[in-house]
Image (cartoon, coloured by chain):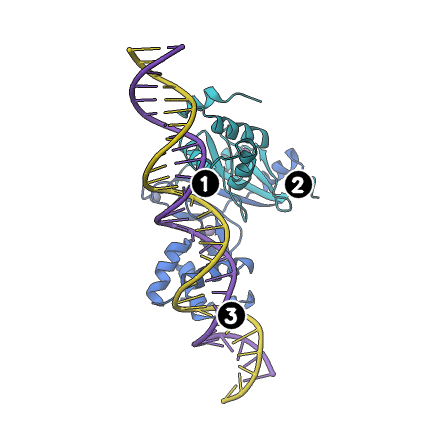
Chain colours: A blue, B cyan, C yellow, D purple
Amino acid sequence: MINYTDELRKHNLKATPQRLAISDALYINGHMSIEVLYELMLKKFNSISLATIYKNINLMMENSFIQEVKIPNAKSVYELTKTAHSHLVCDSCGEVEDVTIDLDAIIDEAKQISSFKIDKANLVLSGVCKNCQ
Amino acid sequence: MINYTDELRKHNLKATPQRLAISDALYINGHMSIEVLYELMLKKFNSISLATIYKNINLMMENSFIQEVKIPNAKSVYELTKTAHSHLVCDSCGEVEDVTIDLDAIIDEAKQISSFKIDKANLVLSGVCKNCQ
DNA sequence: TATCAAAGGATAAAATTTATCTTTAAAATA
DNA sequence: TATTTTAAAGATAAATTTTATCCTTTGATA
Ligand SMILES: [Mn+2]
Ligand SMILES: [Mn+2]
Ligand SMILES: [Zn+2]
Ligand SMILES: [Zn+2]
């Protein structure tokens, strides 16, 4: 169990018990929806407000401490910010997994065939995970 | 202005005036949010219900007549279903543009370094469009 | 330890999406 | 073409999701 006090402060976020617990939960579970995160936090803080979850998720996103992952046909999940990576989603069980793929070639190609100045790539691959196969 | 009567029927959707107008709007504008689509439809049908927009968007998605495009830090947009392609989004003005890039190599790579069976790839590239540069 | 801005909890309000019910109309059929 | 049937439209209520407000509590700083 990592202590996220310093990491939160680096992002200009006060290290409250609720935020430390959210950080831990994301560290342990990887990717979580608002709903699931709230359920989990309720076990630790029996009177935590859903508004606290939303306020923290929004603030943590603004300060780049966490990031949202939008998934086709499913609710968004959130994760601790880390080096750029793509995602694998299981259409059967909803499991979300990280996968690191170099997208530079793709980005270069897009730059050439479009007039955009591109700086970010967001890739979500859908399929069936090992367990569900 | 294309007539979408047959196309709608092929997808088991009755060709109502509202649906033909939605189809036209998507054909002309490419990608539209619920909100913008509703505003536009109100100009054509001064008493169209927002529920009609939602019901049609949902049904058209179920029948694969249209598809949702989830965009980072923005509301979803919808488009007529066409051959698989990726998207460019302008961080400045929100413009969404199609771009066709072959993702097979990427998918193969992901297959090798993961235990997933992958069948779809969803790529959204963010940057700045020509106009906003 | 005292101070203060920020965060938490409770809850209201707003925004978004879905459900229900009645009327209307598209499409199939006679 | 007229009739029949079934699905869709419109109106609106309800549910769900997200944000705002207000007061209390607490983390960070000195
Ligand atoms: Mn991830
Ligand atoms: Mn498109
Ligand atoms: Zn699975
Ligand atoms: Zn632009």
> Can you identify the residue that label 1 sits on?
A125
The answer to which of B35 and D18 lies nearer the viewer is B35
> Can you identify the residue that label 3 sits on?
A14
- Measuring from the top left, give residue B125's x and y in whole percent: 57, 42
The residue that appears at 41% across and 48% down in the rendered structure is A96
Q: Say left or right for B128 vs A47.
A: right
Q: Is residue A60 above or below residue A90?
A: below
Q: Amino acid at mark 1?
A: Leu
Q: Is mark 2 within 8 Å of ligand 4?
A: yes
Chain that bears disc 2: B
Q: Residues within 10 Å of mark 2 (few under 14, many from 20)?
A: many
Q: Quadrant of the C terminus of chain A?
A: top left
Secondary-structure class at tag 1: strand
- Measuring from the top left, give residue A21's x and y in whole percent: 41, 66
Q: Amino acid at mark 3?
A: Lys
The residue that appears at 47% across and 21% down in the rendered structure is B5
Q: Residues within 10 Å of mark 1 (few under 14, many from 20)?
A: many
Q: Confirm or deny contact between disc 1 and disc 3 (CB under 8 A).
A: no
Quarter residue A130 falls in: top left
The answer to which of D29 and A89 lies nearer the viewer is D29
